[in-house]
Image (spheres, helix red, strand yellow):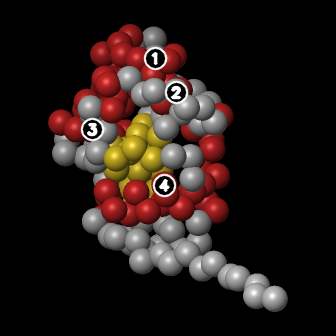
Amino acid sequence: MSQNNPIRLFITHAWDTTDEYLRIFEYLESSRNFFYKNFSEPDKAPPGGGKEADREELRRQIAPAECVIALPGLYRQQSELMLFEMTFAKASDKPVILMRPFGANAVLPNAITSLSDQIVDWDGRALIDAVKAQARHEESNRWDTIEFKLD
């Protein structure tokens, strides 16, 4: 992964930029030396095309992605649409990273956990590590440093 070869991502959406959707980009942008290209385009809903037009546009957006990040809030609002996005990603042999519900200990439905390759908490480092591992099979070489002050 480099600036010339960014990881191609698709973030699930229902033709809207929710708080969860925007929060993902806060995490992605805050990581140094992490380069990605976003292929999700929630502002490109097909005009009056109906369910099949929506699905065709989503297929077009997901096709070039290396990895899909699934947002749990979308399942509560548009379960059929989210299941379609995740199922198409799996059928296209793309890994799916499922985020846990933000700030809650809610149980994720089996319908979406069974379609995910990895489930991640809302933690920037964990998300970046999961994307690198799932998209490019790069393992994190991070070390946590703990400083102690001895008196």
Disc 4 residue type (three-letter): Leu
Secondary element under disc 1, as helix, strand or loop, is loop
Which mark lies nearer to you, 4 or 2?
2
* Mark 4 to mark 1 CA distance (whole Å): 23 Å
Disc 3 residue type (three-letter): Ala
Residue 146 position (above or below residue 48): below
Q: How many marks?
A: 4
The image shows residue 26 at horizontal and vertical percentages of 64, 52
| Nearer-N-terminus badge (1/3) | 1
| Nearer-N-terminus badge (4/3) | 3
* Mark 4 to mark 2 CA distance (whole Å): 19 Å
* Mark 2 to mark 3 CA distance (whole Å): 24 Å
Q: Would residue 95 be visible to someone looking at this image? A: yes
Q: Can you identify the residue that label 3 sits on?
A: 89
| Nearer-N-terminus badge (2/3) | 3
Residue at x 22% of width, y 38% of height: 90
Secondary element under disc 3, as helix, strand or loop, is helix
The image shows residue 105 at horizontal and vertical percentages of 55, 32
Contact flag, marks 4 and 3 (Cβ < 8 Å): no
Which mark lies nearer to you, 2 or 3?
2
Secondary element under disc 2, as helix, strand or loop, is loop
Q: Can you identify the residue that label 4 sits on?
A: 127
Viewer-closest of 74 and 58: 74
Q: Can you identify the residue that label 2 sits on?
A: 106
| Nearer-N-terminus badge (1/2) | 1
Q: Can you identify the residue that label 1 sits on?
A: 78
Q: For residue 55, what is the image quadrant?
A: top left
